[in-house]
Amino acid sequence: SYAGCARLITEHHYNADISELVKEDCTAMAFILDELLTDAKDKECSSLVRMLVAAIASCNHAPEAQTSLVTEVKNALSRALALPECTNKHTKIQALTGLISTMIDSCPPSPGTNTTPFKQPGLNINNIVKCMLK
């Protein structure tokens, strides 16, 4: 099922010895965000990563996968900010911050979000925004 796939991707871990590309033990999402999102060798790779992130963000029936995705993006942003000053650092930060709007836009509104008469029209409080605010 779709929710099961989202959970499988967000919960998967890589061991450092699995490939020469995986330098240390990490989650699959950490590897994807750190290594594949800004891969200069494969131009299509970054758009495929954005599509995967959008698909997981849209998975309201797997809120634990959405929470894990938000946590992974926050952690990847922290790792990028900790890099020494270089072009790669700014490229990673720009790509990761772009993912944030993709995640928010891809997540459908939660059921019952528009039931309060005092909410501002157009205010998009979905599961991703709720996770980010935690």
Image: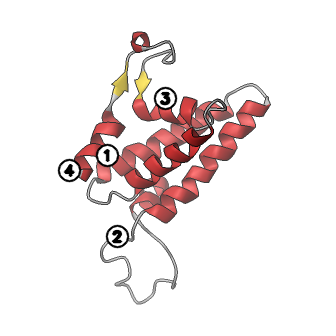
Looking at the rendered structure, the kind of residue marked 3 is: Phe
Q: Nearer the viewer, mark 3 or mark 2?
A: 3
Q: Nearer the viewer, mark 1 or mark 2?
A: 1
Looking at the rendered structure, the kind of residue marked 1 is: Ala
Find residue 8 and report its horizontal and vertical position in percent: 28, 38
Residue depicted at x 47% and y 39%: 72
Residue depicted at x 23% and y 46%: 4
The vertical placement of 81 against 126, above or below, is above
Dot 2 corresponds to which residue? 110
Dot 3 corresponds to which residue? 31
Dot 1 corresponds to which residue? 6
Residue depicted at x 62% and y 52%: 98
- Upstream in sequence: badge 4 or badge 1: 4
- Upstream in sequence: badge 1 or badge 3: 1
Q: CA distance from mark 3 to mark 4?
A: 24 Å
Q: Which mark is on residue 68?
A: none
Foreground: 36 or 133? 36
How many neighbours does mark 1 have within 10 angstroms: few (below 14), some (14-19), or many (20 or more)?
many
How many neighbours does mark 4 have within 10 angstroms: few (below 14), some (14-19), or many (20 or more)?
few
Find residue 65 and report its horizontal and vertical position in percent: 33, 47
- Upstream in sequence: badge 4 or badge 2: 4
Q: Are marks 1 and 3 in contact (CB under 8 Å)?
A: no
Q: Secondary structure at mark 1?
A: helix
Q: Quadrant of residue 90?
A: top right
How many neighbours does mark 2 have within 10 angstroms: few (below 14), some (14-19), or many (20 or more)?
some
Dot 4 corresponds to which residue? 1
